[in-house]
Amino acid sequence: MRVVSSAVARVGALAMLLVAAIAVTGCSVQSGPANVGHTAAARPIVDPERVQVIPDLTYATAGGVPLQLDICKPVVQSKVALSFRPAIVIIHGGSWLEGDKAEPQWRAVCEWLGAAGYVAAAVDYQLAPKFVYPTQITDVQEAVEWLRAPAQVKRFGIDRTLIGAFGGSAGGNLAGLLGTVGHGSLSTGSRVAAVAELSGPANLTASGAERPVLRPRVLSYLGCRSYAACPQAVAASPIDNVDPSDPPFFIAHSTDELIPLSQSIDFVARLRAAHIPVTFQTEPGDLHSISMLNDTLRAQIVDFFHTQLVHRTKGRS
């Protein structure tokens, strides 16, 4: 069952910025407001022949419109040698207003995690301003529940008790919400067992609104006319949903990008105060979201998921 927090308190907004550039070493994108929505040409991270891509699977319908995801799964022996594999939900960025699961840079992420041995599921969700919060997190929660259904467990060989989340930018915010919304067991419903997020805005309330250039996008996403009348900003902020039952996190953030580094610093502090294991990686410069993904950071993220998901699977067998 989907669970969306009803917390109501502080008001305001921060926001999200660009649809991130391709995740390959040496490929960069400026992080200024003029580049909101900018994408870069993609190059494969892995040999596509190592991954089977199954596109455009419907995980739910909304108003008669299908909501779809792409599956990327390994076709060769990989680091994760299991009968039933953990799954990772991939959530694209784009200020909650734009972006697509199959954009080349996000497809590359899906193929990378599939080649690493996971059943990777790149998810589309309904976009603002037509659809406002909590539509986006509800859609992503629906995708997690779909992956846990017996039909998908059988078809894709998923370990339904071990589903992780990966997101960048607005997708990092939604991945953070997947990890923090709800309480209790991480192996049922829409809960996830591990979260890796890049450049995710964790605080959408007034206290996190340091960059005015981004505020109109957050207001559009939250469905608010002004920050003074936007109580849903709290419920939409991962930092305000943390509790001790939440999963381990991997958080990466550039030191000089448009989303303030303080967003992740404060979120890490809140998670650690709740005794949630956190790996926190800062990257020098202004690269945003998956444009940060160099060989080292990719290896760190795969090791994080391997520790949090694969080791748990082997421990039960």
Image (spheres, grey):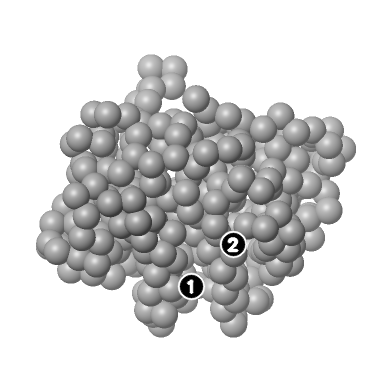
Percent coordinates x, y for residue 48 in the rendering: 17, 63
Q: In this view of the protein, which residue sits in the foreground, 188 or 301?
A: 188
Q: Is residue 62 left or right of residue 270?
A: left
Q: From what the image shows, is residue 290 above or below residue 147?
A: below
Q: In this view of the protein, which residue sits in the foreground, 188 or 258?
A: 188
Which is nearer the N-term, disc 2 or disc 1?
2
Percent coordinates x, y for residue 113 in the rendering: 31, 60
Q: Is residue 157 visible?
A: yes
The total number of labels drawn is 2
Query: Quick one: which residue is furthest to the right in this view?
Result: 228
Identify the disc placed on residue 292.
Answer: 1
Residue sitting at x 34%, y 39%? 160
Q: From what the image shows, is residue 258 above or below residue 158?
A: below
Identify the disc placed on residue 277.
Answer: 2
Secondary structure category for the residue under label 2? loop
Q: CA distance from mark 2 to mark 1?
A: 22 Å
Tell which tag, 2 or 1, sits nearer the viewer: 2
**Location of residue 3 (image quadrant):** top right
Q: Residues within 10 Å of mark 2 (few under 14, many from 20)?
A: some
Residue sitting at x 71%, y 51%? 239
Q: Is residue 176 left or right of residue 190?
A: right
Residue sitting at x 71%, y 67%? 265
